[in-house]
Image (cartoon, rainbow, N blue to C red):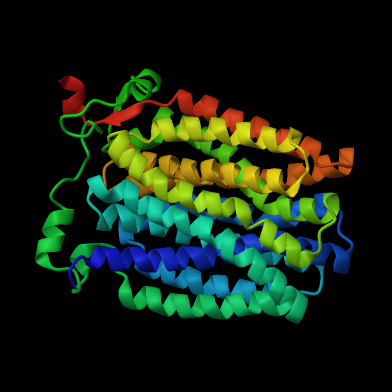
Amino acid sequence: MKNYRKFVLLIVFIMYTLVFGSRISIGVTIPALVSEFGMSNTEAGALSGFFFLGYFLTQVPAGLWIARSGCRVLVGAALCLMSLFLWLFGSMSTLTWAGWYRLGLGVTQGPISVGGNSIIGQWFPPKEQSRAIAVMVSSTMLAPILFPPFCSWFIVNWGWRLMFQFFGILGLVMAVGWVYYIRSCPEESTRCSPAELAEIRSVELLGKLETAGREQPFLAKLITARTVGVADTKRKLLRSRDLVLTTLAYFFFVSVFYGIITWLPSYFVHARGMDLISMGWLVAIPWVGALLGALTGGWVVDHWLGGNPLPVMIWGSIFTSASLYIFLVAPLSMNWTIGLLLIFGLFVGLTPAGFMTYPIRLATRAIYPIGMSVMNSGGNVGGFLSPLLAGILLDRYGNYDAMFWYFIVCGIGSAVFAMLVRRPVEEKALVE
């Protein structure tokens, strides 16, 4: 097949849409769980956050495994186990078991995330990687558009338990498709032609990360003028202060991302008095903007910034916080709400393209999954703490203003740490 890597990207896109959709469906389910089990906001936030604790535990081990043995078998097994925990969550009878099943779901989805990024690093030449990552990230923006209305409708008609079990069945189907069509690298695939393989492997690194014959925009150079060499050993990568700073920045950004996904449905139900169906449609609106932002982000990095993801990380985080602040103080009319949700979503969708590209730029093809797993681990700590802390704030102050301020501060923290990160270049470029 000509350009088989595009079909591989389609499989990754479908997989991520399903995986992410099953992950975030807890947000739409929280009002039903509160009604059935009488949970406090803190308990609801903890239940959502348990997923990210499990996700955190498997990121680095998955990165080490994939760097050594590839991702095909590991991701296939993880999809099967994910399906099992989705089914069990739909069958649970107590909140204790619900917490354990959410933890298990996070453990199984951790390797899937690292595996998807590894596939892009292996199957796409550097000049196409940012756009491929943007397509992958866009699946995490498409899922919040499709799943909240679908989940609300499903819960009203058949209940939340059957919904999770249905997702479990879809996960098994996805596992079969993954194992059949995907190989860890193009060299292992009979569907990848020699010409395509030569194109993929023609260049191993992007080099100076600037488009040939074109300087970076002034603002990009002003913010990211400092450079650092590309890490070519695990030791260099794990000792890199830039990886640490990127991980901290991603921690704060993911705190905003998953905090909003978890608590925005409850905000519209409890603070705005909406029914479940209306809420399902409204919480999908920001992710329409996010889908546009995700698709735009990769193009901006590749074409406007010469492959440099740092300006997207910095400015995306700043405008995410700014749009949340305006949402907090704006009138409560529906027109204002819809417009500001779209703007917020645009920047939330744009920013991950930068974060997901940076670890690939920071290390060679052989070891970058380790850097990706470290960054994702930091993000997952944010994903664990953010829903929990937001729930504590809700119980403590009894309104959603404090929660939104928490998310605004997290967005600012993400921008501050991203500003301290240096731009990776090849050692020979540093010498020049």
Quadrant of the snapshot with the N terminus: bottom left
Instruction: Report the front residue among 340 and 221.
Output: 340
Q: Residue at image x 81%, y 65%?
A: 33
Left or right of 63, for residue 126? left
Left or right of 51, for residue 136? left
Q: In this view, does 49 lie above or below 1?
A: above
The image shows a total of numbered marks equal to 0
Left or right of 308, for residue 403? right
- Residue 361: image quadrant is top left
Q: Residue at image x 41%, y 51%?
A: 295
- Residue 330: image quadrant is top right
* Percent of width and height locating residue 195: 10, 62
* Percent of width and height locating residue 312: 43, 35
- Residue 308: image quadrant is top left
Q: Is residue 246 above or below residue 352?
A: above
Q: Is residue 246 above or below residue 40?
A: above
Q: In this view, does 189 lie above or below 267?
A: below
- Would residue 381 be visible to someone looking at this image? no
Instruction: Report the front residue among 19 and 154.
Output: 154
Q: Residue at image x 70%, y 63%?
A: 280
Quadrant of the snapshot with the C terminus: top left
Instruction: Report the front residue among 357 and 84.
Output: 357
- Would residue 314 be visible to someone looking at this image? yes
* Percent of width and height locating residue 167: 59, 75
Left or right of 7, for residue 105? right
* Percent of width and height locating residue 155: 74, 74
